[in-house]
Amino acid sequence: MLQRKMLMSIASVLVLVALIAGATMAWFTDSETVAATFTAGTVDVGITDPTDIEIVNPGDIINFGAEEDAGYYHGFDNDREIPQGGYDRALKISYTGTKAAYVRVLVGAGWVGELSNTNLTLEGVEGSHWVLQEDMVDGKYVFLLDGILNGADEDFGDYDLADIANVPFTVTIDGAGTGNEYQGAALDMEFEVQAVQAANVDPNAIPFE
């Protein structure tokens, strides 16, 4: 009887030791879950709407890219003995995108109706960062920014908006080529600005289209 009680006591001790050992061998564990949101950048470009010109004259020059629209004026230059008529018109882009971008401006110009546009000459401004391209797009002149415009969150570009906001060029109405058939005719101009993110884009094949 005594031997049986001793065996039961020993067995109880062994079970207790096993339980203690098992508890000390338990793994430490922990876990944590996090979430992340990846927001796409933006390309958001705009352009001003220049003030209409009520009357244009043969021989006038319309100067775009001024700081602000100005009225009709006459002035002399070094090569002329008669006053040249002209207008200053503000044409500015705006950019609120986050991405650095390639930018171009498309300019359409033409007389309403069946009148010829051969009396119109559009030229870029020497020294400007907006370069008039040789090829037109959909019958429109193309001015390409000669570098990358910085965005709000990307500044690896060549220019900040303040440096290139004005888009300068001139439109000249040839006096000798503008006869009486143009009296009262309207000259329509259309301006469009396009932007494409610069990151991961081949500068020699910018996909504006």
Image: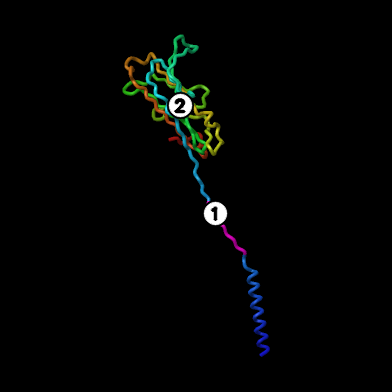
Tell me the crowding category of disc 1: few under 14, some 14 to 19, or many 20 or more residues within 10 angstroms, Cα based: few
Judge whether 100 appears above or below 125 on screen.
below
Q: How far across and down, in percent of the image, does residue 176 sit?
A: 38, 13
Judge whether 87 appears above or below 194 on screen.
above
Which residue appears at 53% of the width and 52% of the height?
Answer: 35
Which residue appears at 51% of the width and 49% of the height?
Answer: 37
Q: How far across and down, in percent of the image, does residue 198 sit?
A: 51, 37
Mark 1 touches mark 2? (CB < 8 Å): no
Q: What stretch is highlighted in magenta?
A: 28-35
Label annotation for residue 34: 1
Q: Mark 2 points at which residue?
A: 91
Q: How far across and down, in percent of the image, does residue 86 sit?
A: 43, 17
Give yes or no for residue 32 being in the magenta stretch.
Answer: yes
Tell me the crowding category of disc 2: few under 14, some 14 to 19, or many 20 or more residues within 10 angstroms, Cα based: many
Residue 180 position by quadrant? top left
Give yes or no for residue 130 being in the magenta stretch.
Answer: no
Drawn side of residue 7 relative to residue 190, left or right: right
Q: Please, what secondary structure does the residue beneath circle 2 have?
A: loop
Q: How far across and down, in percent of the image, does residue 128 sit?
A: 51, 24
Q: Please, what secondary structure does the residue beneath circle 1 have?
A: loop
Tag 1: amino acid: Val
Drawn side of residue 1 relative to residue 207, left or right: right
Return the residue nearer the eye: 25 or 200: 25
Drawn side of residue 139 relative to residue 158, left or right: left
Query: What kind of colouring is applied to the model shown?
Result: rainbow
Residue 118 position by quadrant? top left
Tag 2: amino acid: Leu
Label annotation for residue 107: none
The furthest residue to the bottom: 1
Return the residue nearer the eye: 116 or 26: 26
Q: Principal SS element in the magenta part?
A: loop
